[in-house]
Image: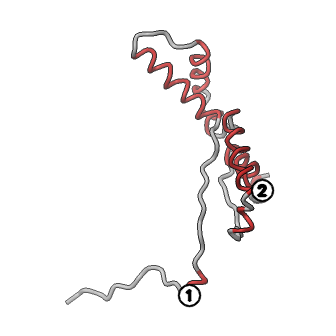
Amino acid sequence: NNQRERRPCLRIASMSALKTLYLIRHAESLENERIGCLQRSLSNIGRLSLPRMSDLRRSVELINVPAQVDSDVSSVGWDQIKQVGDQLRADDFLTKNNVQLVAHSPLLRAQQTSEGMLGCVSATSSTDQ
């Protein structure tokens, strides 16, 4: 019989080694806003009605791919950050939940969300400068 004994890939030494991971998605970005404009425009065209000029203008901005990859938070996103950040501070979330580490992607929208909601931004490596 060639079957080997199966062992768990992760061994937990004690319950004190357990950590809780909180995931927060970035607030609405300018890219998300532009995609919404494109979706509204296409929906209007599908219903045989003209899209709004403002939606068309914002949709065309999607052609600038680099601006989409690392876009800022939109005005709606800043409102989201303020609302959630105010609630997290009112609940003293970081202290009560003993948050020890905050990490996020290097993209602007993630940095802006982290700083606005949690009051911190991850350190950058020396190669990022």
Q: Secondary structure at mark 2?
A: loop
Q: Residue furthest front?
A: 90
| Residue 129, image x, y percentages | 80, 52
**Residue type, label 1:** Ser
The residue depicted at 75 percent of the width and 67 percent of the height is 95
Rounded to the nearest angstrom, the CA distance separating label 2 from label 1 is 30 Å
Q: Is residue 20 above or below residue 16?
A: above
The residue depicted at 60 percent of the width and 30 percent of the height is 33
Q: Quadrant of residue 99?
A: bottom right
Q: Secondary structure at mark 1?
A: loop
Specify the label residue 39 is tagged with. Answer: none
**Residue type, label 2:** Cys
Q: Is residue 102 above or below residue 26?
A: below
Task: Return the residue nearer the eye: 85 or 32.
Answer: 85
Q: Is residue 102 above or below residue 37?
A: below
Q: For label 1, count other residues whose C-alpha is less than 10 Å away and answer few (under 14), some (14-19) or many (20+).
A: few
Quick one: label 2 or label 1, which is nearer the N terminus? 1
Task: Return the residue nearer the eye: 66 or 82.
Answer: 82
Q: Quadrant of residue 66?
A: top right
| Residue 125, image x, y percentages | 75, 59
| Residue 110, image x, y percentages | 67, 48
Query: Residue under circle 2?
Result: 120
Q: Is residue 91 left or right of residue 37?
A: right
Query: Residue under circle 1?
Result: 14
Quadrant the N terminus occupies: bottom left
Q: For label 2, count other residues whose C-alpha is less than 10 Å away and answer few (under 14), some (14-19) or many (20+).
A: some
| Residue 45, image x, y percentages | 43, 14
The residue depicted at 79 percent of the width and 59 percent of the height is 126
